Image (tube, grey):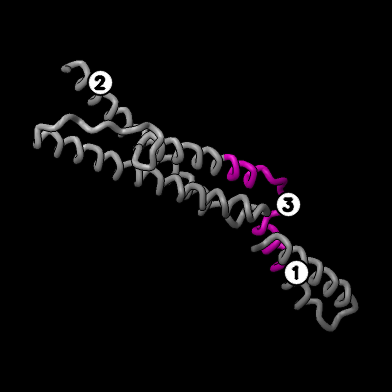
Amino acid sequence: MADTDRYEVRSQKVADALRALLTALATAGIGAVYAMHGQTTVWGAWFFSGLLFLVSLGCVLRSWFVAKHRELRRREASRANQPQPEFTKWSRKSSWLWDTLAAWTLFIGAALLSVAVWVPSGKSCYEAAKAFAEVSDKTTAASGTAQADEWVDAYLAAQHWKRQVCP
């Protein structure tokens, strides 16, 4: 029985370390999404990666509550001198299930974020807004001159580009 208890304690320590790692990675992913969301053209990729990082955090939180619930049930069984309750590995009240879901959503979120990062430069929302601002200033400066029509065309093109890439 002592070996079983020792292995259970070790298993819980490993599970807690895994949850801490998943929490840190998901939080870093949310920070990365927030930091670079205006720099990408793939709006859906960064949006859904951020959403998946949030889901991953939710799964980790659920896993912690399930682990706490499991320990409370074991404590109550011990107090009542009853046998320890059995827990299935893949039930909805299994911390293993929630940790696995957290890891998968974190992995998929990171993959989507990498897609958003590797979009070719020159097509980001930031660059479109910057180009639009420059053309807008030059269009205003050129009003009333012979080149005004050319700058208006450039202004409309930059505005169209900005509308296409910025959410």
* Image point (73%, 52%), residue name: 122
Q: Which amino acid does label 3 sit on?
A: Gly
The image quadrant of residue 117 is: top right
Residue 154 appears at what percent x and percent y?
Answer: 82, 68
Q: How far apart are marks 3 and 1 (CA)?
A: 15 Å
**Element marked by disc 2:** helix
Q: Is residue 129 above or below residue 41?
A: below
Residue for point 32% across, 31% down: 15
Mark 2 or mark 3, earlier in chain: 2
**Nearest the camera: 36 or 114?**
114
Q: Name the residue: 9% across, 32% down.
A: 81
Residue projecting furthest to the right: 146
The residue at which mark 2 appears reads as 7
Residue 66 image-quadrant placement: top left
Gap in angstroms between the C-alphas marked 2 and 3: 55 Å
Give 1 or 61, whichever is nearer the viewer: 1
Residue 122 disc label: 3
Query: Of the residues shown, which amino acid type is indicated by label 2?
Result: Tyr
Q: Mark 1 points at which residue?
A: 159
For the residues labelled 2 and 1, the Cα–Cα distance comes to 63 Å
Which tag, 3 or 1, sits closer to the chain's start? 3
Q: What stretch is highlighted in magenta?
A: 111-134
Q: Quadrant of the N terminus?
A: top left
Q: Nearer the viewer, residue 154 or 159?
A: 159
